[in-house]
Amino acid sequence: MNIRKIKAIIYAVMAAVFYAVNMPLSKLLLAKVEPAFMASFLYFGAGIGIGIIYLTGKRSFADKEEKLSRNDFPFTLGMIVLDIAAPILLMLGLISSTSSGASLLNNFEIVVTSLIALIVFKEVVSKKAWIAILLISIASVLLSFEDITGLKFSWGSVLVLAATVCWGLENNFTRKISSKSTFQIVTIKGIFSGLGSFIVAIISKSEFPKLIYIFYALALGFVAYGLSIFFYVRAQKDLGAAKTSAFYAIAPFAGAMFSFVILREAITENFGFALVIMIAGSALIVYDTLHVRVTWV
């Protein structure tokens, strides 16, 4: 394995770890910042931060990329609208669910992305991927119950799952414009999605947070969304999209670990069962991505 591939793997792992801090730190900030404003400042942090990197850094890589065109507008608009809805749903879900559980539930995004790609864009899904999708779905159902014996739903988990559905659809919209300028896509995504969430917060009469908490949210957004996407794209240059996403699958488990360390969350029986099943499903999807795929229609 050459140095460039090793660096690319490190970039992919860094992208996953940067995103993983989002759950526990967002849950802490939600005690001071209402969900719509929280979603807004997270995306503003990503858009502003990556925009500054583009304007002040080495632009040779970005300048070689093709810019977005008028034909890309429908997919860009869809990306923005879904990126407004998803983080608001996630923040609302985090209020009444554990950060560790929400981290694992993020793996359901793989299921939604794959199914939409199959149904809408006619992509082929392998047998191993179908088994992985089933395992991840079962684990997600387990995590959605506060008490599996009493069949009591955790509505916070349902909101987190709704967020993953939005992001799964958004992934497919973004895929249609992924060959264009990454700096441009991330900056537009951050600024306009942040603006949309800000408008939602104003309309819903959410309480405006103190300046110090706005700064914290912007900084978290720059790291968890902005830098995560930035390193993800750099990894894709040498690994390709499929292998990069496979390494990125560690993010939910890193998020759960950070939740235990930062928030001191307890490990419930439900979480333990779901964790084992989720690890099996995620390992299978990673194996399927990194090796030769046997596909069927």
Image (cartoon, rainbow, N blue to C red):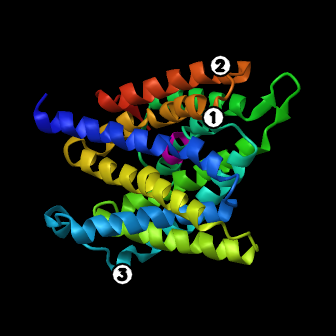
User: Residue 239: in sight, yes or no?
Assistant: yes
Q: Which mark is residue 19?
A: none
Which residue is drawn at the image coordinates 41% and 47% (left, top)? 123
The stretch in magenta equals: 110-115
Q: Position of residue 111 (x, y in %)?
A: 54, 40
Which secondary structure lies at badge 1?
A: helix
- Secondary structure at badge 2 equals helix
Check whether the beta carbons of the residues at disc 2 and disc 3 lie within 8 A of each other: no
**Image position of 96 (left or right of 220):** right
Mark 1 neighbour density, 10 Å: few (under 14) some (14–19) many (20 or more): some
The residue under label 1 is which amino acid type? Leu
Q: Judge whether 284 appears above or below 248 on screen.
A: above
> In the rendered view, does 291 fall on the left or right side of 286?
left
Left/right placement of residue 229 relative to residue 206 reads left
Question: Residue 70 shows which numbered tag?
Answer: 3
Query: CA separation, marks 2 and 1?
Result: 17 Å
Measured from the top left, where is residue 1 in percent x and y?
A: 13, 28
| Residue beneath the point at 42% across and 67% down | 47
Q: Nearer the viewer, mark 3 or mark 1?
A: 1
Residue at the extreme right of the image, as rendered = 150
Q: Quadrant of residue 4?
A: top left
Kind of residue at badge 2: Gly
Q: Which residue is mark 2?
A: 272
Please tell me whether residue 41 belongs to the stretch shown in magenta. no
Q: Residue furthest left?
A: 2
Q: Which residue is mark 1?
A: 263
Residue at the image point whose x is 36% and y is 53% from the top:
227
Q: Which one is earlier in the sequence, the residue at label 2 or at label 1?
A: 1
Q: Earlier in the sequence, mark 3 or mark 1?
A: 3
Name the spot of residue 176 as percent of width and height, x first.
38, 62
Q: How far separated are the C-alphas under marks 2 and 3?
A: 48 Å
